Image (spheres, helix red, strand yellow):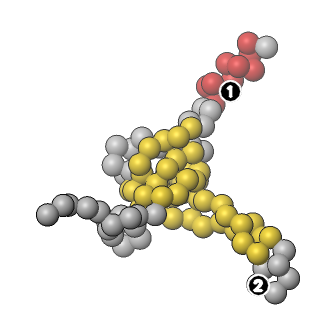
């Protein structure tokens, strides 16, 4: 008998808040047509994500995966950090180098 997992949703979003130990909020954007007028509307959703290693920082682009309920609001977990957001020190040193 094989141990196979069900297919789970994967999303890519931006870290918008660090809520405490091992918890972050991730916002992901998507586009949907208006039901009547068919104009494409930009929408966003904020999800609570479990960050086991406290790896993500504010503004990072991250990949998240749906998982079992971890707490009252957390139903997603961090898979990996795709792109790091520049920190204040990096921005300051690059500006002073010019």
> Residue 51 or 21: which is nearer the viewer?
51
Residue 78 % position (x, y): 42, 51
Label 1: state its secondary structure. Answer: helix
Relative to 68, 27 lies left or right: right
Local crowd size for mark 1, using a 10 Å CA cut-off: few (<14), some (14–19), many (≥20)? few
Q: In front of the other: label 2 or label 1?
A: 2
Label 2: state its secondary structure. Answer: loop
> Residue 2 or 15: which is nearer the viewer?
2
Instruction: Name the quadrant of the C terminus.
Output: top right
Discs 2, 1 touching: Cβ within 8 Å:
no
What's the mark number on residue 35? 2
Residue 14 seen in the figure: yes
Looking at the image, residue 34 lies above or below residue 82? below
- In the rendered image, the residue lying farthest to the top is 97
Residue 76 % position (x, y): 41, 62
* Earlier sequence position, callout 2 versus callout 1: 2
* Residue at horizontal 59 percent and vertical 51 percent from the top: 14
């Amino acid at each position: 008998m094989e141990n196979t997992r069900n297919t789970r949703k994967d999303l890519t979003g931006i870290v918008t808040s660090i809520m405490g130990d091992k918890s972050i909020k991730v916002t992901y954007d998507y586009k949907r047509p208006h039901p009547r007028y068919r104009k494409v509307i930009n929408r966003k959703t904020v999800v609570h994500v479990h960050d086991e290693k406290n790896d993500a920082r504010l503004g990072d682009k991250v990949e998240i995966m749906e998982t079992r309920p971890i707490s009252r609001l957390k139903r997603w977990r961090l898979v990996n950090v795709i792109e790091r957001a520049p920190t204040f020190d990096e921005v300051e040193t690059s500006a002073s180098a010019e």
